Image (tube, rainbow, N blue to C red):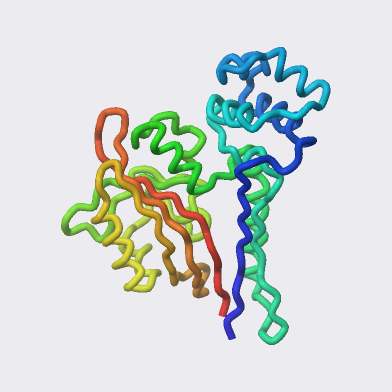
């Protein structure tokens, strides 16, 4: 019997409660190592107004939060208290999840909490907003680079697109140990051939300044066990600061199924 793992990812486009906003703004300034005055100057906000709103716990408009997020290059989801929860769905009729799956669950939860605390709870919409803002160029990129993989364009005869950079917090790195030094032949032999064919076709179809968002199933091997599930994948044709073409890939886990 299949036993599903569910993800409940709730990213609010507004803040959860007014009371938390001042603390979030203060924490954000500490993360970015800037004063509140400097943050206001960067965002085009009046320092005395925001300082008074924080000091006297007055309502802070959404437009203020939006401007701070853009100026300090951080997702709006930083200001939400809602947190992704990754856990096994209860299923009393089936067997208990094995230790490997419980370890995966714990690892993803711990990492999610750590990223939220750092203001790096990134959604696909956040990445799309950034792509449009930078005109599909790899600039203003520090907040995202650890969460995405960058590939060279697929060449004829390649087993798969060659990685240029692999984010240490990307889904491929987290879940399946992918890295820039990975032997592509050995790595993709762990996947279902149909999945590999889909991945290859998706790389082949990438065009400059275009993006796709798809839900992809996967079947892979990890620590001698089979893992099945699905993930949401954003792929975009980007260029570096010198104009060289690359493919950016950002993935979010949707679910894991444990047989």
Q: How many marks?
A: 0
Q: Position of residue 91 (x, y in %)?
A: 69, 80
**Residue 20's quadrant in the figure?**
top right
**Residue 192's quadrant in the figure?**
bottom left
> Residue at coordinates 61% horizontally, 67% vertically from top-left?
6
The N terminus: image quadrant: bottom right
Q: Position of residue 230 (x, y in %)?
A: 48, 66
Residue at the far right in the pictured view: 56
Instruction: Locate residue 8 relative to residue 245 in the image: left or right.
Output: right
Q: Is residue 149 above or below residue 78?
A: below
Q: Position of residue 72 (x, y in %)?
A: 56, 26
Q: Is residue 80 above or below residue 58?
A: below
Q: Nearer the viewer, residue 97 or 46?
A: 46
Q: Is residue 219 above or below residue 50?
A: below
Q: Position of residue 89 (x, y in %)?
A: 67, 72
> Residue at coordinates 67% horizontally, 51% vertically from top-left?
83
């Amino acid at each position: 019997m299949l036993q599903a793992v569910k993800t409940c990812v709730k990213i609010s486009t507004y803040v959860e409660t007014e009371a938390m906003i001042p603390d979030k703004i203060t924490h954000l300034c500490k993360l970015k190592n800037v004063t509140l005055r400097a943050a206001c100057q960067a965002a085009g906000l009046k320092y005395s107004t925001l300082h008074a709103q924080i000091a006297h716990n007055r309502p802070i408009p959404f437009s203020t939060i939006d401007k701070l997020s853009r100026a300090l290059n951080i997702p709006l989801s930083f200001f939400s208290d809602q947190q992704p929860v990754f856990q096994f769905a209860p299923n009393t009729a089936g067997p208990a999840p094995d230790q490997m799956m419980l370890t995966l669950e714990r690892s993803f939860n711990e990492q999610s909490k750590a990223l939220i605390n750092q203001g790096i709870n990134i959604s696909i919409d956040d990445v799309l907003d950034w792509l449009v803002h930078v005109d599909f160029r790899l600039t203003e990129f520090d907040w995202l680079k650890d969460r995405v993989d960058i590939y060279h364009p697929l060449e004829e005869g390649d087993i798969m697109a060659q990685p240029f950079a692999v984010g240490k917090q990307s889904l491929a790195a987290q879940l399946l140990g992918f890295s820039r030094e990975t032997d592509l032949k050995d790595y993709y032999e762990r996947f279902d051939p149909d999945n590999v064919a889909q991945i290859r076709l998706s790389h082949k179809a990438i065009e400059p300044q275009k993006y796709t968002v798809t839900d992809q199933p996967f079947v892979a091997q990890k620590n001698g066990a089979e893992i099945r599930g699905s993930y949401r994948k954003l792929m975009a044709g980007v260029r570096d600061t010198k104009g060289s073409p690359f493919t950016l890939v950002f993935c979010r886990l949707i679910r894991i199924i444990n047989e």
